[in-house]
Amino acid sequence: MAITSLPKNPTPAKTSFSDFAYCFYGELKIGKSTMAANTESPLFLDTESGLNAITASRVAIECIEDFRNVYDLLKKGDHSYKTVVIDTIDNAYRIAAESIVKTHNKNNSRNIEHISDIAYSKGWDMVRAKINGIIRTFAQLPLTLILIGHSKKEKFKPRNGEETEIHVLNLPSSIRSEVMAMMDMILYFGSSRYFNKEKNRWVTERLIHCSPSNVFIAGGRLNFGSSPINMGKSGQEAYDNLTKRFNEVMKRRKKNVKR
């Protein structure tokens, strides 16, 4: 479609939680999917069959074409969903990579086992294009987009420091950087264990980290502050605490604009 005119006025900044795209990643079984199930009318694109303990609307994703089929159905608008959850983006990558290998072996006499076997790094370029296409496609819908992923440890050496390990989204680095760049907020889900003197016992807290540290990557286009968000005792409480922090951020931004 040709551009025939230029905007006459600035586009207002988005102010609703549902207007942004999020990446939830972190420790196993900490409650990422459970919290996502408490978002507004979610539809899970289930790539790993890991939602058996959660009551939620889901579509099993077994091949790359399933993503396109779900998108086409959502685009028609004959539904009540307001959130799309890709759970997990790690397995979405695996599905994309397997589809490329399958297509290559079908069209070539020399079979391969992994995308890295395709010459000149073309396999990596192809899977990166597929993952980017999936995310950008669903991001075009008038729905909240949430990616859920596992974390892994990678060695990291700051310019002026010793080598350490940092938690990152469990994707190859080149693909991970592009995926995270498309997200408005990257939230790391982790646990903290400490001794509670009042209760005289060890206590474990589940926390949502909104800003980066020397042990994980987090942050984004909104300043959620440096203090973590307590997930509480349920997915609903975790979601309520997250949206409460979001509303505080919006209120602060609105106040600063008026100054």
Image (cartoon, grey):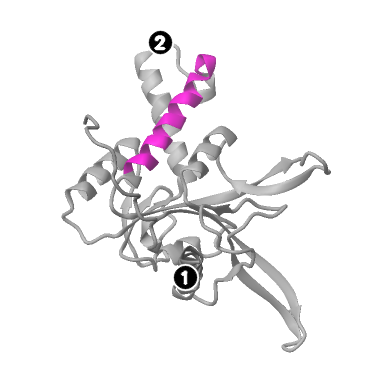
Provide the residue designation for mark 2. 109
Q: Residue 255: x, y in percent?
A: 48, 69
Does the magenta-highlighted stretch encompass residue 134? Answer: yes
Provide the residue designation for mark 1. 251
Which residue is drawn at the image coordinates 46% and 43% (left, top)? 182
Q: Residue 94: x, y in percent?
A: 46, 37
Q: Residue 258: x, y in percent?
A: 46, 67
Q: Which residues are magenta?
A: 118-137
Circle 1: residue type: Lys
Which residue is drawn at the image coordinates 45% and 30% (left, top)? 127
Report the predominant secondary structure element of the magenta stretch: helix
Q: CA distance from mark 2 to mark 1?
A: 61 Å
Which residue extends farthest bottom? Answer: 198
Which residue is drawn at the image coordinates 57% and 36% (left, top)? 172
Residue 65 appears left or right of 76: right
Secondary element type, mark 1: helix
Classify 10 as above or below 123: below
Circle 2: residue type: Ser
Does the magenta-highlighted stretch encompass residue 104? Answer: no
Q: Are marks 2 and 1 in contact (CB under 8 Å)?
A: no
Q: Nearer the viewer, residue 171 or 110?
A: 171
